[in-house]
Image (spheres, rainbow, N blue to C red):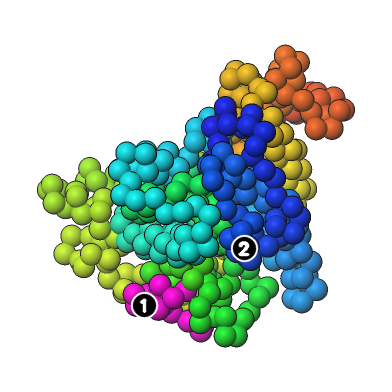
């Protein structure tokens, strides 16, 4: 995520890029203090932004390994597209603003710091590594135990598959609470050191979202591993509220939330949302809380709806009752799109083309006008919504897709979008014409059948 830079800073030539070796190693936190220590915040590379090619390469590798080992892909296209859509949506605000995590940190550092740890000391680097990971553990635990925070974090858990694409299923609004847990570090740790570790802590959590790696032997004692995180994503009763770790599993072992993987894990929410629409994936629980808040009588009960666990109800303990969690039978069938395979591939191609615009927008943000930037963001959101409509087979999907093609042509004609493939606008024009023709024929058929009746 582009957590560091404002638009003005994106013009700063001092910001460094990562080498291939660093790019690969940073996904596993295999990085030295001397290669990732910076005096000024502006010098810190945007490691998360640089990670996109590594994410894609590892996802393809996981697909290949899964195919060779199990004879089937590691996930499903509809679910993976929804996860990646959430990843794209969660990054869009960073085109306009510095992340709240960095903004609040800098504010506290500049106004309330108690002392200044040396930015170039290995001790500071290792202390920050531990402190950020400790902060993440408590943020993550609260994100599961406080309903209003769960409203954001549930997005990450809404996938019923478990593969590297699941790691990208991120919330748009989670940052608005996570910053609180890191703010004590701003009393003594320089922002440039914090900015490095907050990114590596996030990046480390990418590779653990896989079923391809079963067990890592003695490393399981200290590190958060795919096996431990599979438990965290489970909806089996033994998995609920377990393994909150970011990089080190020691925090769960210390604070009593550790659980080893034993029986087959069923992934996803205890009450699956059965949709691929990106906005429902992001905000459905917030809407649910809104309804429950107003229908629950009494101030203290309303307060509890917001700040106790998602399973809480009047008369129940803070985190709800274990027996309220639906039992996993092993016969759970993940929700699938009823769209044809061809239509899913079409949605996948449109997503890939959008991703090219999206990446190009991030690279050239500083050179784009505010209007172009806003129009591009609108086009990206429209594309993601339409893909969700297509996958959910919503009746309005055809109209949405026609509208999206029309928006693309308009933006292209007025120079706000450059097609990744030069002849792409022609393809869109053809597709737009076919949609209109299909739409027209269908409307006339419906009209004729009404008149005939
Ligand atoms: Zn979680
Ligand atoms: Zn996860």
Query: How would you rate the neighbour count of disc 2 (Cα within 10 Å): few for under 14, some for 14-19, many for 20 or more?
Result: some
Question: Residue sitting at 74 percent across and 17 percent down?
Answer: 415
Is residue 92 in sight in this rendering?
Answer: yes
Residue 220, placed above or below residue 125: below
Q: Is mark 1 on a helix, strand or loop?
A: helix
Q: Is the magenta stretch mostly helix, strand or loop?
A: loop
Q: Give the vertical position of 49 relative to 71 (above or below).
A: above
Dot 2 corresponds to which residue?
Answer: 32
Q: Does the beta carbon at disc 2 come under 8 Å from ligand 2?
A: no
The answer to whether 83 appears left or right of 115 in the picture is right
Q: Do the residues labelled 2 and 1 touch (CB within 8 Å)?
A: no
Picture coordinates of residue 39 (x, y %)? Answer: 54, 46
Which region of the structure is painted magenta?
A: 249-264
Residue marked by disc 1: 254
Which of 160/139 is in front?
139
Instruction: Look at the image and tell me whether residue 154 can be seen.
Output: no
Disc 2/disc 1 C-alpha distance (Å): 27 Å
Where residue 225 sits, quadrant-wise, is: bottom right
Residue that appears at 27% across and 66% down: 320
- Earlier in the chain: of badge 2 and badge 1, it is 2
Residue sitting farthest toward the top: 414
Residue 271 is inside the magenta segment = no
In the rendering, at what x and y percent does residue 423 appear?
Answer: 87, 28
Q: Which of 161 and 53 is in front in this view?
A: 53
Q: In which quarter of the image is residue 291?
A: top left
Position of residue 357 in the picture relative to residue 128 (left or right): right
Q: Where is residue 54 in the image (x, y as percent from the top left)?
A: 72, 55
Q: For the residues carrying marks 2 and 1, which lies nearer the camera in this image?
A: 2
Q: Residue at x 68, y 73 (%)?
A: 212
Whether 127 is drawn above or below 429: the answer is: below
434 relative to 224 in the view: left or right: right
- Give the quadrant of the N terminus: top right
């Amino acid at each position: 995520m582009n957590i560091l830079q404002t638009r003005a800073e994106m013009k700063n030539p001092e910001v460094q890029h990562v080498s291939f070796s660093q790019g690969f190693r940073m996904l596993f936190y295999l990085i030295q203090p001397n290669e990732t220590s910076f005096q000024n915040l502006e010098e810190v590379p945007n490691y998360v932004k640089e990670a996109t090619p590594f994410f894609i390469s590892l996802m393809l590798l996981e697909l290949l390994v899964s195919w060779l080992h199990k004879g089937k892909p590691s996930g499903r296209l509809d679910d993976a597209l929804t996860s990646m859509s959430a990843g794209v949506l969660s990054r869009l605000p960073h085109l306009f603003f510095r992340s709240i995590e960095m903004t609040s940190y800098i504010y506290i550092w500049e106004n309330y710091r108690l002392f200044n740890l040396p930015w170039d000391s290995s001790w500071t680097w290792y202390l920050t590594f531990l402190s950020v990971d400790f902060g993440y553990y408590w943020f993550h635990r609260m994100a599961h135990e406080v309903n209003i925070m769960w409203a954001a974090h549930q997005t990450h858990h809404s996938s019923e598959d478990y593969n590297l694409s699941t790691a990208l299923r991120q919330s748009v609004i989670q940052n608005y609470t996570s910053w609180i847990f890191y703010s004590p570090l701003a009393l003594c740790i320089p922002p440039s050191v914090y900015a490095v570790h907050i990114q590596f802590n996030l990046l480390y959590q990418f590779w653990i979202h896989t079923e391809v790696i079963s067990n890592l032997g003695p490393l399981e004692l200290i590190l958060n591993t795919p096996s431990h995180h599979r438990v965290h994503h489970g909806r089996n009763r033994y998995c609920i509220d377990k393994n909150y770790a970011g990089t080190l599993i020691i925090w769960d072992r210390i604070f009593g939330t550790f659980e080893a993987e034993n029986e087959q894990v069923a992934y996803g929410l205890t009450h699956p949302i059965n949709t691929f629409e990106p906005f429902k994936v992001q905000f459905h629980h917030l809407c649910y809380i809104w309804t429950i808040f107003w229908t629950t009588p009494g101030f203290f009960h309303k307060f509890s709806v917001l700040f106790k666990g998602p399973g809480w109800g009047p008369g129940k303990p803070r985190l709800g009752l274990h027996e309220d969690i639906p039992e996993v039978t092993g016969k759970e069938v993940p929700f699938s799109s009823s769209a044809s395979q061809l239509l899913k591939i079409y949605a996948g191609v449109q997503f890939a083309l959008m991703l090219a615009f999206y990446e190009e927008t991030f690279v050239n943000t500083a050179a784009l006008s505010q209007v172009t930037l806003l129009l591009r963001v609108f086009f990206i959101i429209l594309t993601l919504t339409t893909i969700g409509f297509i996958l959910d087979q919503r009746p309005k999907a055809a109209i949405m897709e026609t509208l999206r093609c029309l928006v693309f042509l308009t933006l292209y004609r007025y120079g706000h979008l450059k097609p990744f493939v030069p002849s792409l606008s022609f393809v869109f024009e053809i597709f737009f014409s076919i949609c209109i023709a299909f739409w027209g024929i269908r409307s006339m058929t419906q009209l004729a059948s009404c008149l005939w009746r």
